[in-house]
Structures are given as C-alpha cells and as structure tokens.
Amino acid sequence: MLRTALSRRAVYPALRVGAHRYPSPQVRLASTTSSPRPFLYRTRLCLRWTGYAAASTVLGVTLITGAIFIHDAFTYTDAHVDKVPVSPLALQPETGGPKNLPVVGAFLSDIEDPENERISQKPRLVIVGGGWGAVGLLSKLSLGDYHVTLISPDTFTTFTPLLPSAAVGTVQVRSLIEPLRKIIARLEGHFISGKAVDLVMSERLLEVEVIGPDGSPKSIYVPYDKLVIGVGSVSSTHGVAGLEHCLQLKTIADALQIRRRIMDNFEKASLPTTTPEERRRLLSFVVCGGGPTGVEAAAEIYDLCQEDIMQYYPKICRQEVSIHVIQSGEHILNTYSEAISKYAEDKFARDGVELVTGARVSSVHPNHVVYTEKDKGTGESTEYEIPANFVLWSTGIAMNPFTSKVAGYLPNQVHKKAIEVDSHLRVKGAPLGDVYAIGDCATLETSIVAHLLELVDEADKNKDGKIDLAEWEFMVKSIKRMMPMSEKHLDRVKELFELYDKDKDESLTLNELAVMLQDIGNKITSLPATAQVASQQGKYLGAKLHRLTKRDASLTKNMISREAADEFVSKPFSYHHLGSLAYIGNAAVFDFGKYSFMGGLWAMYAWRSIYFSEQVSSRTKALLMTDWIIRGIWGRDLSRL
Amino acid sequence: MLRTALSRRAVYPALRVGAHRYPSPQVRLASTTSSPRPFLYRTRLCLRWTGYAAASTVLGVTLITGAIFIHDAFTYTDAHVDKVPVSPLALQPETGGPKNLPVVGAFLSDIEDPENERISQKPRLVIVGGGWGAVGLLSKLSLGDYHVTLISPDTFTTFTPLLPSAAVGTVQVRSLIEPLRKIIARLEGHFISGKAVDLVMSERLLEVEVIGPDGSPKSIYVPYDKLVIGVGSVSSTHGVAGLEHCLQLKTIADALQIRRRIMDNFEKASLPTTTPEERRRLLSFVVCGGGPTGVEAAAEIYDLCQEDIMQYYPKICRQEVSIHVIQSGEHILNTYSEAISKYAEDKFARDGVELVTGARVSSVHPNHVVYTEKDKGTGESTEYEIPANFVLWSTGIAMNPFTSKVAGYLPNQVHKKAIEVDSHLRVKGAPLGDVYAIGDCATLETSIVAHLLELVDEADKNKDGKIDLAEWEFMVKSIKRMMPMSEKHLDRVKELFELYDKDKDESLTLNELAVMLQDIGNKITSLPATAQVASQQGKYLGAKLHRLTKRDASLTKNMISREAADEFVSKPFSYHHLGSLAYIGNAAVFDFGKYSFMGGLWAMYAWRSIYFSEQVSSRTKALLMTDWIIRGIWGRDLSRL
C-alpha cells in the first residue's frame, strides 16, 4: 500500500519536469501484480527505491522551501532608525584642490558606529572601476585594512564572459550582476556612483563626476592614500567610419540593447507589410571580430533561431536568417590552438554561419556593412557589401578618456592601448606606491633596456663597465625578478652571452647589452585583455595591499620607504594562464596551453560548470542554474522589453 | 559509517539554504557517541531519517536537473529550413479601404503547412490588446475555431497584480510576463506588434499602426469577421497639472522605470555632496491614490527600506526616508470592507507610512507635490506641499485614444470612461456580432429604461398598453435575462409593482414603468476595472465564440441571424466576484464579500499562493517561486539597470 503510494509519487515529479525516461504508470502497475519472479522483484525493488527517492525529494524540497520562507519572514523588521551620528564634514564638505571642488573628507557612514569610526582612521584606499580587477582585489582585503572607497558609474559588477548568452536570453542579465554595495559591505567600505575624470597626483586627489540630485553632472574630489585604477577599456575603432551604427557587447546595457534589437528585428520581419528585401536585411546578423566574444555571440544567435524562433515565428523568418562573422585574420579564435579554430570553423560551416576571413570592415552604415577582402593571389583587394540591421563590433580595445588623460600626464608612458605599469602594477611615472592600475586599462612594461643602467650598476661587481659571464648570470636573475614575463626568453643564459658577445672578449659592453636587452624585450608579448588577467592582477594587488598594512610596523622599523615597500612585501606579479574557453553552439572548446579539448554536449556542460564555479556570489550561482533549467524546459523568453 | 556519511550530508543542504533550525554538526557528533539511551536513540533515528531525506533530496534534485539538461540538449537541432511556401499576397499585400492602405489579406505563415492552410479558411477573429481579457479569451478557444490574429504593441502579456512587487525588485519583471506568441502558438494564430488607431466598421477593417523596418510608423488595415477590443485604459488625470512629472504603475515599462528611479534616488542620497534638504527630498516617496496598487506600492517601498536599504546604504538614508499615501476618500482600500481598511491603516501607522486622507492632489512639480485638505469642521480647504522626487500616480482610469475614437463613431455611447457594451459584451451601436469589447476599456450598460418599449412589446400580452402584475412578473424575468446585474434589485417583484403603481389601478402605465426602470437602472453599479473582471469577460467571450463556430450548422438550419446568434448560443455575461486581496508589508488582506481575512505572515503566503495559482504558464510559476526563494535567502537585487 505504502509502496504503491510512494511509487505513484515517484512518477509525477519526473513527468512534471518533462523527463521522458522515467518509469511510466503502466510499468508501475505491471510491477505491482504478484508472482515474485526475479525480474519483477528487481523491478519492484528499484521502483520502491525510486519511490523513496522521489517522495523524499519532494519532501526535502518542500521542507527547504518552507525553511526559506520562514527565514524570509524574519528578514522583516519594523525597527525604526533615528539619530544616526553623522560627521558634519560629511554633510557640509569643504572645498579645495586646484579646481576648488568639494573634497570628500568624510562619508555619511564614517561615524555611524564604533567599527566604522575605527576604520575611518585607516589609510584611504580608492578603487576606480567595479570589474574583475576590483572584485578580485576586494576579495583579498580584510575588514579594517583600509578605509575603502569604490567608485564606478554602474552600481554592480558584471560577469562579462556570459554577456553573449545574456544578449539572446539564454540567461537573464540580472543573473550576471552583483551589487557592488553588497561586495564592499564586508569591508564596511563606501561606494560612489560616478566616473573618474581627472587626477591630481601632487595632492592625491581623484576628480569624480557624479550625477547630482538635480540630474546634472557635478565634479568632486576624492582624496586617496593609495589609488587603484581598474576602469577597463573601450572598443578600438580601427578608424572605421560609422561605428555609431554598431552594437557592442562590453556591458549589461549593451546586452539589453542587443536583445531588444534582435527581437525587434524578428517582429518587424514577420510584419505582413515588410518586403522580402527588407526582411532579408532585418534578419542579417553581422559580427565584426572573430574573437571569443564575436564567435560566442554568433553561436548564441544561431541557437536562438534554431531553438525558439523556429517554433514561434513564421518559418520564412528562420529561412531568411543569415549570420556573418567578419575576421581580419585567416582564422577565427586565432589566439587559441589551431585545432580549436579548425573545430569552430567546421561547426559554423555545418550550421551555415558564414565566415569571412582575411577581410577588413571599411565602413558601417545604417543598412549595410562594407568590407574589403584581399585576393591571396593577386593581392588586390575588392569591396563587398552585406545588408544588415544588426552589426556587432567586437574587435580590440582602446583607452577610455580618463586613462588616456592620466597617461598623458606621465613621462615614459609610450603604450597606446593602456597605461604602462611596472611588474608591481604601479603606474610608471606616478609617485611610487601611490597609483596602481589593473585589468584591461593596464599593460605590464616589456622594455628591459629602459632599466639597462640600474641593471649594470647592480651587476657590475668589479665596476669595469663591462659584464662578464658571472655578472651576466647575476643580472639574468635580477631581470627575471624585475620582469617575470621575460623568464622564458632568458633560459639559455650562456648561449645568449656568447651570441651577443660580438667581439668575443668574454664580456658584454653596454652597447652589446643594449642590443641584447632590446631584442629580448621585443620578444615579450604583453598580456591579453581578459577577465582572467584582470582577476589575477586584482587578487595579487589585494594580497599585497593587505600585507602592506599588516607589516606596517616592521616596514617602519626597517626604515623601508613607501617607494620600496612593494618590493619588500611581495614578489612582482606573474601571470599564470589557466586556459581559454569558448561556446560555439551546443559545443564548446577549451585551450589549456599544452592540451586543448573540444566537443559537443559534455564540453558545453564543462564550459557551463567552469563559469558556474567562477561566480562572485552564491546568489548569482543560483540564478544562473535556474536560468539554465528554465531555458532547458521552456526555452528562451522571447519578450521584447 | 553509512549513517554518519548520510547525516553529514543531512547537515549541509540545510546550512546551504540558510535554515538555522537544522541539527548542527555538534548535535550529530554527540549523537554518534555510543550508550543507547532512549533519547540518544531517538535523536539518532531522526537524524538517520533526516539523513536519508536530505541525501535523496540531493540525489533526486541532481537526477531531475540532469534529466532537464539532457532534455535541454535535444531542444537543439541543426536542421535547416528552406523553400517555405508563402502566399504571394503575404509578400505583396494589396491596398484598399478608405485610406487606401495595405490590407493584410494573408499572413506569412498562412500556407506554411496543411494545418495552417486549413485554418486560414476560417472566419477571421482579430483581438486587440494582450491583457487579461485577451488571454482569458484565447484560453477558451480550440485549434481551428478561427483564424486568430492578436494585435498588441507589447509582445507579451503581463501579470499586473504583482507589478508593485516588481517595481522594487521583490520579484523580477521577467517573471511577470509571458510572450504572446507562445500563447497563440496553440491556436496557430498570428501576432502583429502594433497599436490599433482606427476602425472602419462598414468594411470590417481595423487600422493598425506598426513600426516599419525603417523605424518609422506605418499604418495597415487588418480585416476581421469578428473584432474583440481589449486595449485596457490609461490613468485618468482628474485635470491635475504636471502629471508628466509622475510615475505610473500600469505596465512593465513603468515598473522598470520606478525601480530605476528608486535605486537612483538612494544612490544620489548617499553622495557625500548631497545637502540634507536634497537628501530628504530624494528619499520622500509620495503615492497618489489609496487603492490596492497605491497601497501595495507604498508597502513594497517600505519593505525595500527595512530589509535591504538598511543593510547596504548609510543608515542616515534609511532615517530620512518618508512615505506618503494621499487619498481623496476618508479611508484607503475603501472598496474593501471597513475592517480591512482599518487594519491596513493601523499597519501603516505602526510602520510610519503617513496617510493623508480626504485630500486632493492639486498639482505635481519636479520637486514637490501640492495637495489641498478640507477641514472637516469649517469645511475650508488648506494647501500643503510635500517635497518629493518620486510621485506615483495611481488613481482611476480613462479611455485611451483608440477607444474614445471608436466610441465617438457610435450613437448612444454616453459613458465617459469606457465603451458601453450590452450584456453579451457587444459594443453598443456597432453592427451586432461584429465588435466586442472586454476588460478595462469596456463597461456593461446599466440603463434598463432604454429598452422600455421592446420590454413592453414582449410582456404586454393583452396589448392594452399597460402592464399588470402577471405581465410584470414575466417582464422581470426578461429584464434579469437581459441584464444579470439588475437581479438583486428585482427580488421583491410584488413590492416594486405596488410601490410604483401610483394610481393603484393594479397596472403600470408606460410612465410609471419608465420611472421604475430608471430608478432600478441607477441602483446598478458598474463593474470595477480589475484583472478579475477582464479575465472573466475574456473567458465568457472565448467560450461563446467557440460555441458560435461549433454550432454554425444548426444556426444556419434554424435560420438564426448573425445578430441573434449570441443570444442563441449563450446566456448574457454575469460577473462572479471571487474577492479582492492586497499586500501591505509582510501582511495581507482578503475581502471575499461576506467574509474578510487579514493577517501577517500566513496571510502573506496565502496572498502569494493565490497569485501563484493564477499564473498564465508553469514557466512564470517557476520563475516566481525562484524569485521569492532568492529574495528570501539573499534579499533584493539593488543594482540600478
């Protein structure tokens, strides 16, 4: 009796979630007939246990949900707050600095409670930007290390790798974001919603533009003891005209816009008054850039068409869809292993996603894209045109106005795409130990020759102005220490020495050294602008900043200057590549340096679980899992908001 | 051993979901010590079962999720569609009608497959609007009844009762919407994203304005055999100046805007450069209208402050928050029972939500609201002012441009707020059986006297131009049939007769009848503009339309004209009030006519489960449940998108 009851319940939840391979009621009934033949017995046994499992699944889930709802009720309080102590300086800030703007000397919550009051005495750490770098950094700080202020126009941090999925509704945008206030709450930090516009290094003031109560922009100074710049980058235009007609995929806002545009185009395409030409144009999706973002976007758009559009829009709309990926290089995903690009290209070929490789977009117009393709043989380039109402621009990065301004203030900032930092992530040319930069907006210096003299000074023991083999071996060590990225180019110490010792006098003159270091420097490739790099830099810097406060006493005891402190407490930053991955339409590819994997379903779930594990909060984990399940059962939400 | 393993797992999921009343590891360890005293034994037993339950919960959930993910994989296909048959008329529509616009004679998917081809021969049912009425109607139709076309600017239907929750992020907006295309898919129907602007009843053409491929508005004609108008209403201005500074809460877009505004105000309020006055203004929330929407919005804003703002924003911000509800009547929720308004008012009093009753808003400005309050004693009114950056306008309804235009075309359309329909929901004055109206945009006629002559005709058997008691009793029946709303005013048949038979001649003259029917008509109150009414009207109409096609043959056999068909196949519409409910801050109130309930937690969950059960799809059910769980564990998402 009990068994029957249970096994009946065993069937329902299975059916409810649309899994078709569960025991069907018929099977169950068959099993409940008597005559205990071994097969029947086993069936019955397994059914009974399915019964137990399912029943107590239902039970357990119910209990858990119940528990949550009860907990829910206790989050509610009708406590009233009043007479919160606020420092007058926070209510009436003084003005100062070169532009005589209000200076944020105190924050509203600085003396709210003893804890805050204690922390407000700590050195002021100001972090600009709320991306991977900032979040990584904050994760390594402990409560009370610094008086932390986080500044970002967006009030949330974004899980950027899944933006392509969010752009077509495979996951919801809100599943990718976590409020920055929740992240800094652990450190009793402060948040200002605004964007950095200028920097006064002499007075350690950061100029921030906020939107005032009246809705108009307003500038303020935020004083700092240590400043970390992690404002990311903007897309590089490559001097292409008409980029204002392009969509981008760097932010949540972009993802929302793309999602709206896609659904909008399908609605317009299915209007009975749309001409066939217009329909083809509306359903032509062009992606400029064959990097991970571009490829994933193209793949997700294809998925959307196959899994949802097909079902709910006139079939003709699906038929007229065309997806182009325009790539300047010879292959897509060309930062990945060859096997991977191959795999991706074959996949796209099967899916009818058209690859245009070795082509450059020359201009973008409201209704079409123009690109030129070089003929491999003759080398002359021909111009082609694709009608399109959807052009996604995802190629390369450039400095945003703030970073280029900062770089402009500094000597020996030669790099065009980002602020150059030394191997301790300190902005080159800025007062040492004051200003750091991480993530896309920063690039590690690769020029060794710039340090030639100090290196020689240090290495040239016998002060003969020349470097013999022993001294060279010493020098290699310090170069490696100074610039871990140079390591793999300095393996063959002796060979190098002999190679560049032109006059074979068993020693290197300054000129010979200069040439050698120049060559080695050129060999070093700068780090890619990826979430992985940003996150590692953030964590590295966070750990260092933590150590700097913890070891403050010993620093002063040993009379370590602010300039030398970084080297004293930590090794230079070195990047450990954990591999790259990309989603390509119910298949995924992984590139772990030595090994690379690619495949269908299983790879897709591997891809999902890696991103799942990288979530900043258990909340977004839950949201993401739900999205995938909801999408699995009911498909994507086709609503145009 | 096994037990320990299990009971260890028993603890984790419990902790993971933050339920604190589960056995803690200590307890478990204690229990695993020997000495089988009854208590310990029981503990161990119960722990073991918790173990089993939890273990197989985890197992079950994993299995189910796995099943979904596998199912997920099979939603994916790389099938390509081509050569979809499309009727030339759908590609090149002919023009016609008074304005010579394109006439949608055929749709893109009309001859896609045999099924569609069959359906395209059916009479054309055009439904304008995608709200409660439309969804209710569609739910009662079967595949093949009609060639259905749904027209709405939004591509989704909205679960309006939860908009206040969505406006503060207690639930996500996407959890309240279901794509209309998914709803009409069952009927192989068609969807046009556009808004109705005009109607040509003589030629049965509906003029629809769509946004063309080039982004500019474009008008087309959609031909119909039967037209259902369910376009809802707009907020009535009550001639108040400056409503453009107000927020509303009728659509998803409104909810999104409100959510953005609230978070924006809190961000601005916590800027260190915001003056105390500005802060108070930014944190002053004014709700105009004490109906369910207004009350729930106020309650949800209060919840947001208590449960989330308090934790993550400077305390001073919470302290400065003020919430006002301005109500013209003497009580809020005045359509509910007195006990309920009382309960709600007390609750708000405890929570410090300020009620301003018996007051009228006279004007709204960017930075403040002006309202006048009448002194009960002297009767003279004084003007007051509340500084505010957030003013929600939720009072009364008015006709939208389309409905007022339609009403303008018709004779005897006297009602100001909506289109008058007869008890069969047919638009009064329009060709009978052609045009119907449901939901907020429609109101049932309440005037009986208008039908005086036909009633007398029918009842006056002996044709003496007077109505005796017997004839009156007969007439009462037909009145009740014609206008179910009049029923409760016609109970005391004999009394009425005697009351109005002034000359006591045992019969009613036309004049006496006219007076009586006028009086009765005035007593009838028109239905409220609620989701419940709209939904019931939609279902009623859907069922009738279904019957009309099913019984087409017998209609023609009995030579029933199109005009008389409605009466032939169905009774007039009569509304059955199922009660009203409202959420008021971790408490809820219910009004089921005779009975009314109110209470805290349990009522809130009752409120939730009623709305849960009313969802249009299992998808939104799942989403809603998830939202409530997520919110229960991690609180609201404070991100400003």
Image (cartoon, coloured by chain):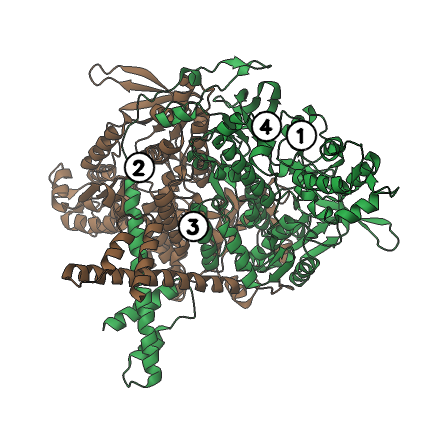
Chain colours: A brown, B green
Residue carrying label 4: B433
Q: What element carries label 1?
A: loop
Q: Check the residue under mark 2 and report the chain it is in.
A: A
Check disc 3 and report the residue beneath it. Answer: B622
Seen in the picture, residue B564 relative to B99 is either above or below; the reply is below
Q: Nearer the viewer, residue B163 or B241?
A: B163
Labels 3 and 4 in the same subunit: yes
The lab-note entry on whether marks 4 and 2 share a chain reads no
Identify the subunit bearing mark 3: B
Please name the residue that numbered disc 2 is placed on: A292
Q: Do the residues labelled 2 and 3 touch (CB within 8 Å)?
A: no
The residue beneath circle 1 is B428
Residue nearest the viewer, comparing A155 with A545: A155
Asked if marks 1 and 3 touch (Cβ < 8 Å), the reply is no
Q: How crowded is mark 4: few (under 14 residues within 10 Å), some or many (20 or more)?
A: some
* Dot 2 amino acid type: Pro
Residue B378 in sight here? yes
| Left or right: where A577 falls relative to A169 | left
The numbered mark at residue A373 is none
